[in-house]
Amino acid sequence: MIPAVQVSHFSRALPFWLPVLLLPLAWFCAVTGGLAILLMPIVTWYMFSVLDAVGGLETENADPETPESDLFWYRAITVMWPPLQFATLFGMIWYVTRAEHLNTLESILMFFGVGVITGTIGITYSHELMHQKNAKERWLGDILLAMVMYSHFRSEHLRVHHIYVGTPKDPVTARYNEGFHRFFPRVLRESIVSSFKAEKAMLARRGLPWTHKSNPFWRYWALQAAMLLLAFGVGGWAGLGLFLYQAFIAIWQLEIVNYVEHYGLTRKHLGEGKYEHVKPHHSWNASHKGTNWLLINLQRHSDHHYKPDRRFPLLQNYSEDEAPQLPHGYPLMTMGAMIPSYWRRVMNPKVREWRAKYYPEIEDWKPYNKGQNPLPR
């Protein structure tokens, strides 16, 4: 018999298990074909936005001192997802490349939906796993990233983004007035370089060359090569193409979220290349309940950067007085980010309000806007 306390913990964690339903939905779409294929992005983007509208905001905070034993059902979600995604992704490659009822366009649309899932859920869960001290969890995070050919994200996120967020040294911090269509190619180009340099520099501090076996890029390349070979072995050239396509869609999903999370926000330059410590107001916060279920509280990004080692159920929400707030949850915000004129009309006034509130002493924001070394007068 399951103890009552465990039943209570499971019931509280249950809403965060909703994304698991996307996997049987993917198989339903593949078997049915036709317009059903569109259900994956529709459900992922719009259903959870509807839940945001119906459920409203979740402003309550869990006790940050909650013991690890009480988080079992939350941890289980992220630990079980990698094998489930692996089976779904490569099972789908095998099935779609042999399915006579799916034409080429349907196959492409099918893997657009798969990429939405591996990006929205898979990369978000890998983000949670890579932050943990447990080596097995970090390995699971690496496997998820290899499935979307973005393994260097772990190094970029831990060695670059968390250290330099809100500064010109962080490629992932979207500059004020920088549209997503300029941001995306810049990040693809700069993040791989900055992550490799960060690992190379860390090895150099230990007196080791970048070619040393402890460089995680060897693991990244090996895992990605294994995924490519498996995709080809399961589905031939068509399977390899579909695998790479879903990986691109997943990366796009990740980077458009990155774009939203820090758009226009900067840390104050203290002189001599030093910046103030990261604080909650250096990330956009959102409290929309449905999307926080979908993205395991990723929208509580202000607290994640403030306390990166907190597991997702313990992330704290911040009020409007403590951190800048997004007007909508991530799904609607990311869709808005695809239209730069709309995005600037909505978000630029909020960035200016943020500047006036937290940094009224800074009059010249041009160096910050251009991503140059900011020297406030």
Image (cartoon, rainbow, N blue to C red):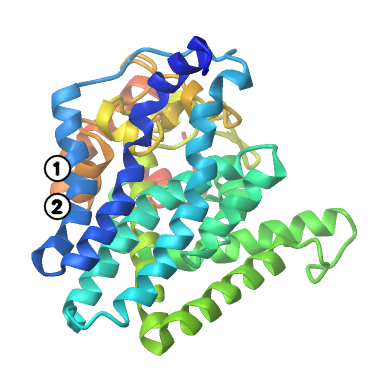
Which residue is pictured at 29% across the width and 57% down the height? 180
The relative height of residue 225 versus residue 316 in the rendered view (above or below) is: below
Residue most extreme to the right? 207
Q: Amino acid at mark 1?
A: Arg
Marks 2 and 1 in Cβ contact (< 8 Å): yes
**Towards the viewer: 281 or 271:** 281
State which quadrant residue 38 falls in.
bottom left
Look at 47% across and 38% down and name the residue there.
77
Whether residue 377 is situated above or below residue 36 in the rendered picture = above
Residue 341's disc is 2
Residue 213 image point, x, y percent:
82, 66
| Closest to the observer, 367 or 339 | 339
Q: Categorize mark 2 by other alpha carbons within 10 Å: few (<14), some (14-19), many (20+).
A: few
Rendering coords of residue 376 (x, y %): 47, 35
Residue 297 in view, yes or no: yes
Task: Judge whether 213 appears above or below 67 on screen.
Answer: below
Q: Position of residue 52 (x, y in %)?
A: 20, 30
Q: Residue at x 47, y 48 (%)?
A: 81
Q: Is residue 174 among the parts visible in the rendering?
A: no
Q: Label 2 vs label 1: CA separation?
A: 6 Å
From the viewer's side, name the closer residue of 229 and 194. 229
Residue 240: x %, y % from top left? 42, 81
Q: Secondary structure at mark 2?
A: helix
Q: Residues within 10 Å of mark 1 (few under 14, many from 20)?
A: few
Q: Secondary structure at mark 1?
A: helix
In the image, is 216 to the left or to the right of 187?
right
Looking at numbered disc 2 in the image, what kind of residue is underneath it?
Ser
Seen at 35% across and 85% down, the residue is: 238
Q: Which residue is mark 1?
A: 345
Residue 60, compared with residue 226, is above or below; it is above
Q: Quadrant of residue 152?
A: bottom right
